[in-house]
Amino acid sequence: MKPIILIDARFWSAVNGGLSKYTRGLIYNLAKLKNSPFRYIILTYKEHPSLANNFQVIPTHIPHYSFSEQALFFLIKRYRPALVHYLHFNHPLLTPSPFIVTLHDLIKNHFPQPKDTSHNFLMYKVKRWGYTLTLKNALYYSQRIITPTQAVKNQITSSYPIPREKIIPIYEGVFFKTQEINPLPIKLPSKYLLYVGSFYQHKNIGFLIKNINLIHQLNLNLVMVTPKRINLNWKEILREKRILFFSQLKESQLRYLYKNCYAFISPSLMEGFGLPVAEAFSFNKPALLSNIPAFREITHQRMLYFSPNSSQDLENKLQDLIQNYSFYEKMSENLKNYFDFHTTAMKTHQLYREIVNI
Protein backbone atom coordinates (compact mmCIF):
# COMPACT_ATOMS: atom_id res chain seq x y z
CA MET A 1 0.00 0.00 0.00
CA LYS A 2 1.38 3.38 -1.01
CA PRO A 3 1.80 5.97 1.77
CA ILE A 4 -0.79 8.74 1.78
CA ILE A 5 -0.02 12.43 1.42
CA LEU A 6 -3.02 14.45 2.58
CA ILE A 7 -3.19 18.02 1.24
CA ASP A 8 -5.47 20.66 2.68
CA ALA A 9 -6.67 22.29 -0.55
CA ARG A 10 -9.65 24.21 0.79
CA PHE A 11 -8.43 27.36 -0.98
CA TRP A 12 -9.15 25.69 -4.35
CA SER A 13 -11.93 28.09 -5.34
CA ALA A 14 -10.89 30.89 -7.70
CA VAL A 15 -12.41 33.52 -5.37
CA ASN A 16 -9.37 33.05 -3.12
CA GLY A 17 -7.02 34.78 -5.57
CA GLY A 18 -3.33 33.94 -5.20
CA LEU A 19 -3.90 31.19 -2.64
CA SER A 20 -6.24 29.47 -5.09
CA LYS A 21 -3.71 29.71 -7.91
CA TYR A 22 -1.01 28.21 -5.72
CA THR A 23 -3.35 25.41 -4.61
CA ARG A 24 -4.52 24.49 -8.09
CA GLY A 25 -1.15 25.00 -9.74
CA LEU A 26 0.65 22.75 -7.25
CA ILE A 27 -1.94 19.95 -7.23
CA TYR A 28 -2.55 19.83 -10.98
CA ASN A 29 1.21 19.51 -11.50
CA LEU A 30 1.66 16.93 -8.73
CA ALA A 31 -0.96 14.92 -10.62
CA LYS A 32 1.21 15.05 -13.76
CA LEU A 33 4.30 13.55 -12.11
CA LYS A 34 4.99 10.02 -13.31
CA ASN A 35 5.54 7.02 -11.03
CA SER A 36 4.86 8.80 -7.78
CA PRO A 37 5.21 6.49 -4.75
CA PHE A 38 2.28 8.23 -3.03
CA ARG A 39 -1.48 8.21 -2.90
CA TYR A 40 -3.02 11.62 -2.36
CA ILE A 41 -6.05 12.70 -0.35
CA ILE A 42 -7.13 16.21 -1.37
CA LEU A 43 -9.41 18.10 1.02
CA THR A 44 -11.39 20.82 -0.73
CA TYR A 45 -14.09 23.22 0.37
CA LYS A 46 -17.08 21.87 -1.60
CA GLU A 47 -15.16 21.61 -4.94
CA HIS A 48 -14.90 18.32 -6.86
CA PRO A 49 -11.89 18.67 -9.22
CA SER A 50 -11.08 15.76 -11.51
CA LEU A 51 -7.54 14.53 -10.93
CA ALA A 52 -5.32 11.50 -11.60
CA ASN A 53 -6.20 7.99 -10.40
CA ASN A 54 -3.92 8.17 -7.38
CA PHE A 55 -5.78 11.29 -6.15
CA GLN A 56 -8.92 11.07 -4.03
CA VAL A 57 -10.86 14.29 -3.53
CA ILE A 58 -12.74 14.72 -0.25
CA PRO A 59 -15.01 17.81 -0.23
CA THR A 60 -15.66 19.29 3.20
CA HIS A 61 -17.90 22.08 4.46
CA ILE A 62 -15.38 23.35 6.99
CA PRO A 63 -14.32 26.90 6.02
CA HIS A 64 -10.97 28.50 6.65
CA TYR A 65 -10.42 30.79 9.62
CA SER A 66 -13.28 29.24 11.61
CA PHE A 67 -13.48 27.54 15.00
CA SER A 68 -14.96 24.49 13.27
CA GLU A 69 -11.59 24.08 11.56
CA GLN A 70 -10.35 22.26 14.65
CA ALA A 71 -12.64 19.36 13.69
CA LEU A 72 -10.37 18.67 10.72
CA PHE A 73 -8.22 16.63 13.09
CA PHE A 74 -10.80 13.85 13.20
CA LEU A 75 -11.33 13.89 9.43
CA ILE A 76 -7.62 13.80 8.68
CA LYS A 77 -6.83 11.11 11.25
CA ARG A 78 -9.37 8.81 9.60
CA TYR A 79 -7.13 8.47 6.52
CA ARG A 80 -3.91 7.79 8.46
CA PRO A 81 -1.68 9.94 6.25
CA ALA A 82 2.07 9.54 6.22
CA LEU A 83 2.30 13.33 5.85
CA VAL A 84 -0.12 16.25 5.93
CA HIS A 85 0.56 19.37 3.87
CA TYR A 86 -1.35 22.53 4.80
CA LEU A 87 -1.12 24.96 1.89
CA HIS A 88 -1.50 27.93 4.23
CA PHE A 89 -0.40 28.63 7.81
CA ASN A 90 -3.84 27.84 9.28
CA HIS A 91 -4.46 24.29 10.45
CA PRO A 92 -6.11 22.52 13.39
CA LEU A 93 -3.93 23.00 16.47
CA LEU A 94 -4.28 19.32 17.20
CA THR A 95 -3.10 17.80 13.94
CA PRO A 96 -1.71 14.40 12.98
CA SER A 97 2.07 14.33 12.66
CA PRO A 98 4.15 14.74 10.69
CA PHE A 99 2.90 17.82 8.87
CA ILE A 100 4.34 20.66 6.82
CA VAL A 101 2.95 24.10 6.02
CA THR A 102 3.35 26.61 3.22
CA LEU A 103 3.77 30.03 4.79
CA HIS A 104 3.25 32.59 2.04
CA ASP A 105 4.14 35.71 4.04
CA LEU A 106 4.14 37.43 7.43
CA ILE A 107 2.08 40.39 6.30
CA LYS A 108 -0.40 40.09 9.17
CA ASN A 109 2.48 40.41 11.63
CA HIS A 110 3.38 43.81 10.22
CA PHE A 111 -0.06 45.12 9.28
CA PRO A 112 -2.30 44.04 12.18
CA GLN A 113 -4.70 46.99 12.08
CA PRO A 114 -8.38 46.01 11.98
CA LYS A 115 -9.02 48.20 8.93
CA ASP A 116 -8.24 45.15 6.77
CA THR A 117 -11.03 43.09 8.31
CA SER A 118 -14.81 43.18 8.10
CA HIS A 119 -15.27 42.01 11.72
CA ASN A 120 -16.13 44.23 14.66
CA PHE A 121 -13.30 45.11 17.03
CA LEU A 122 -13.99 42.36 19.58
CA MET A 123 -14.19 39.70 16.90
CA TYR A 124 -11.03 41.11 15.36
CA LYS A 125 -9.18 40.68 18.68
CA VAL A 126 -10.36 37.06 18.92
CA LYS A 127 -9.28 36.40 15.34
CA ARG A 128 -5.95 38.06 16.02
CA TRP A 129 -5.33 35.81 19.02
CA GLY A 130 -6.23 32.78 16.90
CA TYR A 131 -3.87 33.88 14.14
CA THR A 132 -0.93 34.30 16.52
CA LEU A 133 -1.52 30.94 18.19
CA THR A 134 -1.96 29.07 14.91
CA LEU A 135 1.07 30.67 13.27
CA LYS A 136 3.38 29.80 16.17
CA ASN A 137 2.05 26.24 16.25
CA ALA A 138 2.79 25.91 12.52
CA LEU A 139 6.27 27.35 12.87
CA TYR A 140 7.38 25.31 15.89
CA TYR A 141 5.70 21.94 15.32
CA SER A 142 5.77 21.42 11.55
CA GLN A 143 8.44 19.19 10.03
CA ARG A 144 9.24 21.75 7.32
CA ILE A 145 8.06 25.19 6.29
CA ILE A 146 7.78 25.98 2.59
CA THR A 147 8.08 29.65 1.68
CA PRO A 148 7.69 31.20 -1.79
CA THR A 149 10.91 33.22 -1.49
CA GLN A 150 14.14 33.58 0.43
CA ALA A 151 12.75 36.95 1.56
CA VAL A 152 10.00 35.25 3.58
CA LYS A 153 12.50 32.79 5.03
CA ASN A 154 14.60 35.73 6.21
CA GLN A 155 11.55 37.38 7.78
CA ILE A 156 10.71 34.21 9.69
CA THR A 157 14.20 33.63 11.06
CA SER A 158 14.55 37.27 12.08
CA SER A 159 11.27 37.12 14.03
CA TYR A 160 11.22 33.58 15.45
CA PRO A 161 13.87 31.14 16.75
CA ILE A 162 13.38 28.73 13.84
CA PRO A 163 16.37 26.79 12.41
CA ARG A 164 17.10 28.06 8.90
CA GLU A 165 17.41 24.52 7.55
CA LYS A 166 13.79 23.85 8.47
CA ILE A 167 12.58 26.47 5.97
CA ILE A 168 12.56 25.55 2.27
CA PRO A 169 12.00 28.34 -0.28
CA ILE A 170 10.22 27.08 -3.40
CA TYR A 171 9.17 29.56 -6.08
CA GLU A 172 5.56 29.49 -7.20
CA GLY A 173 4.46 29.50 -10.83
CA VAL A 174 1.94 31.00 -13.20
CA PHE A 175 -1.45 29.35 -13.23
CA PHE A 176 -4.17 29.92 -15.79
CA LYS A 177 -6.58 27.01 -16.20
CA THR A 178 -6.77 27.65 -19.95
CA GLN A 179 -4.84 29.71 -22.47
CA GLU A 180 -8.09 31.29 -23.66
CA ILE A 181 -8.20 35.07 -23.96
CA ASN A 182 -11.52 36.92 -23.99
CA PRO A 183 -11.80 40.69 -24.43
CA LEU A 184 -13.81 42.79 -22.01
CA PRO A 185 -17.04 44.46 -23.14
CA ILE A 186 -15.49 47.91 -22.70
CA LYS A 187 -12.94 49.96 -24.59
CA LEU A 188 -9.59 50.00 -22.83
CA PRO A 189 -7.16 52.94 -22.80
CA SER A 190 -4.58 52.73 -25.58
CA LYS A 191 -1.67 52.64 -23.10
CA TYR A 192 -2.23 51.61 -19.50
CA LEU A 193 -0.41 50.43 -16.41
CA LEU A 194 -2.04 47.36 -14.85
CA TYR A 195 -2.43 46.71 -11.13
CA VAL A 196 -3.72 43.27 -10.05
CA GLY A 197 -4.31 42.51 -6.37
CA SER A 198 -6.39 43.22 -3.31
CA PHE A 199 -7.11 46.65 -1.88
CA TYR A 200 -5.72 45.78 1.54
CA GLN A 201 -3.63 48.22 3.56
CA HIS A 202 -0.24 46.71 2.74
CA LYS A 203 -0.93 46.97 -1.00
CA ASN A 204 -0.51 50.76 -0.70
CA ILE A 205 -2.89 51.51 -3.56
CA GLY A 206 -3.56 54.94 -2.08
CA PHE A 207 -0.09 55.86 -3.36
CA LEU A 208 -1.09 55.03 -6.94
CA ILE A 209 -4.33 56.97 -6.63
CA LYS A 210 -2.50 59.98 -5.18
CA ASN A 211 -0.16 59.96 -8.18
CA ILE A 212 -2.75 59.40 -10.90
CA ASN A 213 -2.21 62.92 -12.32
CA LEU A 214 1.48 62.14 -12.71
CA ILE A 215 0.59 58.95 -14.59
CA HIS A 216 -1.84 60.82 -16.84
CA GLN A 217 0.75 63.55 -17.55
CA LEU A 218 3.02 60.85 -19.01
CA ASN A 219 0.20 59.82 -21.38
CA LEU A 220 -0.50 56.65 -19.42
CA ASN A 221 -3.65 55.36 -17.74
CA LEU A 222 -4.22 53.05 -14.81
CA VAL A 223 -6.35 49.90 -14.80
CA MET A 224 -6.92 48.12 -11.49
CA VAL A 225 -8.17 44.55 -10.95
CA THR A 226 -9.12 43.00 -7.62
CA PRO A 227 -10.31 39.42 -7.00
CA LYS A 228 -12.98 40.63 -4.56
CA ARG A 229 -15.74 43.21 -4.75
CA ILE A 230 -14.77 46.67 -3.57
CA ASN A 231 -16.95 48.91 -1.45
CA LEU A 232 -18.82 51.99 -2.64
CA ASN A 233 -16.25 54.42 -1.22
CA TRP A 234 -13.46 52.90 -3.30
CA LYS A 235 -15.65 52.92 -6.41
CA GLU A 236 -16.42 56.61 -6.03
CA ILE A 237 -12.74 57.48 -5.53
CA LEU A 238 -11.64 55.48 -8.57
CA ARG A 239 -14.31 56.98 -10.80
CA GLU A 240 -13.47 60.49 -9.65
CA LYS A 241 -9.80 59.90 -10.48
CA ARG A 242 -10.64 58.40 -13.90
CA ILE A 243 -9.21 55.00 -12.97
CA LEU A 244 -10.73 52.00 -14.74
CA PHE A 245 -11.32 49.10 -12.35
CA PHE A 246 -12.61 45.54 -12.48
CA SER A 247 -13.42 42.93 -9.84
CA GLN A 248 -13.95 39.16 -10.00
CA LEU A 249 -12.86 38.79 -13.62
CA LYS A 250 -12.71 35.47 -15.42
CA GLU A 251 -9.18 34.17 -15.96
CA SER A 252 -9.56 34.59 -19.73
CA GLN A 253 -10.43 38.27 -19.23
CA LEU A 254 -7.52 38.82 -16.87
CA ARG A 255 -5.21 37.34 -19.48
CA TYR A 256 -6.59 39.88 -21.95
CA LEU A 257 -5.68 42.73 -19.63
CA TYR A 258 -2.16 41.38 -19.17
CA LYS A 259 -1.70 40.90 -22.90
CA ASN A 260 -2.72 44.46 -23.74
CA CYS A 261 -1.18 46.45 -20.89
CA TYR A 262 1.87 48.68 -21.30
CA ALA A 263 3.42 47.48 -18.04
CA PHE A 264 2.53 46.02 -14.67
CA ILE A 265 2.74 48.18 -11.55
CA SER A 266 2.63 47.50 -7.81
CA PRO A 267 3.41 49.92 -4.95
CA SER A 268 3.06 47.20 -2.29
CA LEU A 269 4.74 47.69 1.09
CA MET A 270 5.23 43.96 1.68
CA GLU A 271 4.80 40.75 -0.33
CA GLY A 272 5.69 37.12 0.11
CA PHE A 273 6.03 36.48 -3.61
CA GLY A 274 3.97 38.42 -6.16
CA LEU A 275 2.08 36.11 -8.50
CA PRO A 276 0.72 38.99 -10.63
CA VAL A 277 4.31 40.01 -11.40
CA ALA A 278 5.05 36.50 -12.68
CA GLU A 279 1.79 36.54 -14.65
CA ALA A 280 2.79 39.82 -16.30
CA PHE A 281 6.16 38.31 -17.25
CA SER A 282 4.35 35.43 -18.97
CA PHE A 283 3.15 38.06 -21.46
CA ASN A 284 6.61 39.71 -21.71
CA LYS A 285 5.38 42.80 -19.89
CA PRO A 286 7.80 44.96 -17.89
CA ALA A 287 7.09 45.60 -14.22
CA LEU A 288 7.39 48.80 -12.21
CA LEU A 289 7.61 47.68 -8.59
CA SER A 290 8.08 48.98 -5.09
CA ASN A 291 11.56 48.52 -3.71
CA ILE A 292 10.86 45.58 -1.38
CA PRO A 293 12.90 42.36 -0.88
CA ALA A 294 10.41 39.87 -2.40
CA PHE A 295 10.02 41.87 -5.61
CA ARG A 296 13.76 42.34 -6.01
CA GLU A 297 14.31 38.63 -5.45
CA ILE A 298 11.79 37.22 -7.91
CA THR A 299 12.82 39.71 -10.59
CA HIS A 300 16.54 39.07 -10.04
CA GLN A 301 17.16 42.83 -9.72
CA ARG A 302 16.34 43.31 -13.43
CA MET A 303 13.24 45.50 -13.27
CA LEU A 304 12.41 49.06 -12.21
CA TYR A 305 11.98 49.72 -8.48
CA PHE A 306 10.67 52.83 -6.78
CA SER A 307 10.25 53.95 -3.21
CA PRO A 308 6.60 53.27 -2.31
CA ASN A 309 6.47 56.66 -0.56
CA SER A 310 8.18 58.90 -3.14
CA SER A 311 6.25 60.48 -6.01
CA GLN A 312 9.48 61.83 -7.46
CA ASP A 313 11.04 58.38 -7.52
CA LEU A 314 7.93 56.98 -9.20
CA GLU A 315 8.14 59.70 -11.86
CA ASN A 316 11.83 59.01 -12.48
CA LYS A 317 11.24 55.29 -12.91
CA LEU A 318 8.21 55.83 -15.18
CA GLN A 319 10.34 58.03 -17.44
CA ASP A 320 13.08 55.38 -17.41
CA LEU A 321 10.49 52.77 -18.43
CA ILE A 322 9.22 54.91 -21.30
CA GLN A 323 12.70 55.74 -22.58
CA ASN A 324 14.04 52.16 -22.31
CA TYR A 325 10.88 50.16 -22.86
CA SER A 326 12.39 47.59 -25.25
CA PHE A 327 15.15 46.79 -22.77
CA TYR A 328 12.74 46.06 -19.90
CA GLU A 329 10.43 44.17 -22.22
CA LYS A 330 13.34 41.87 -23.07
CA MET A 331 14.19 41.48 -19.39
CA SER A 332 10.63 40.35 -18.63
CA GLU A 333 10.82 37.78 -21.42
CA ASN A 334 14.01 36.38 -19.89
CA LEU A 335 12.47 36.21 -16.40
CA LYS A 336 9.26 34.37 -17.25
CA ASN A 337 10.95 30.95 -17.35
CA TYR A 338 11.71 31.13 -13.62
CA PHE A 339 8.05 30.64 -12.69
CA ASP A 340 6.71 27.19 -13.49
CA PHE A 341 4.35 25.16 -11.30
CA HIS A 342 5.83 21.97 -12.72
CA THR A 343 9.11 22.88 -11.00
CA THR A 344 7.18 23.85 -7.86
CA ALA A 345 5.50 20.44 -7.84
CA MET A 346 8.74 18.51 -8.43
CA LYS A 347 10.53 20.27 -5.56
CA THR A 348 7.54 19.82 -3.25
CA HIS A 349 7.29 16.14 -4.21
CA GLN A 350 10.97 15.68 -3.41
CA LEU A 351 10.37 17.21 0.00
CA TYR A 352 7.53 14.74 0.59
CA ARG A 353 9.91 11.89 -0.24
CA GLU A 354 12.58 13.15 2.13
CA ILE A 355 10.16 13.44 5.06
CA VAL A 356 8.40 10.13 4.43
CA ASN A 357 11.83 8.58 3.74
CA ILE A 358 11.09 7.03 0.35
Image: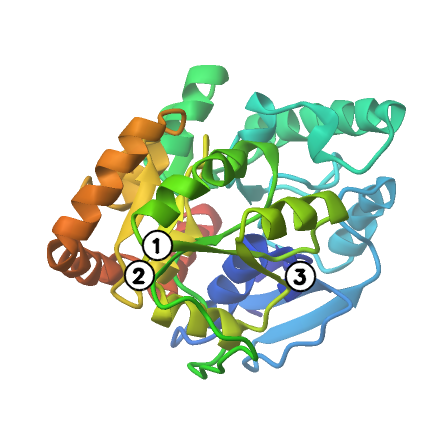
Kind of element beneath mark 3: helix
Q: Amino acid at mark 2?
A: Tyr
Q: Looking at the image, is mark 3 or mark 2 earlier in the sequence?
A: 3
Camera-near label (3 vs 1) is: 1
Can the viewer see residue 250 in this picture?
A: yes
Q: Are marks 2 and 1 in contact (CB under 8 Å)?
A: yes
Left or right: 117 in relation to 6: right
Measured Cα–Cα span from mark 3 to mark 2 = 26 Å
Quarter of the picture holding the N terminus: bottom right
Instruction: Give the residue pinned by disc 3.
Output: 15
Measured Cα–Cα span from mark 3 to mark 1 = 30 Å
Q: Looking at the image, is mark 2 or mark 1 earlier in the sequence?
A: 1
Dot label at residue 262: 2
Q: Amino acid at mark 3?
A: Val
Q: Nearer the viewer, residue 165 or 122?
A: 122
Q: Amino acid at mark 1?
A: Leu
Measured Cα–Cα span from mark 2 to mark 1 = 9 Å
Left or right: 299 in relation to 324: right
The percent coordinates of residue 318 (x first, y second) are 26, 43
Camera-near label (3 vs 2) is: 2
Counting other residues with Cα less than 10 Å from the Cα at mark 2, is it few (<14), some (14-19), or many (20 or more)? many
Q: Are marks 3 and 1 in contact (CB under 8 Å)?
A: no
Instruction: Give the residue pinned by disc 1.
Output: 220
Q: Nearer the viewer, residue 251 or 131?
A: 251
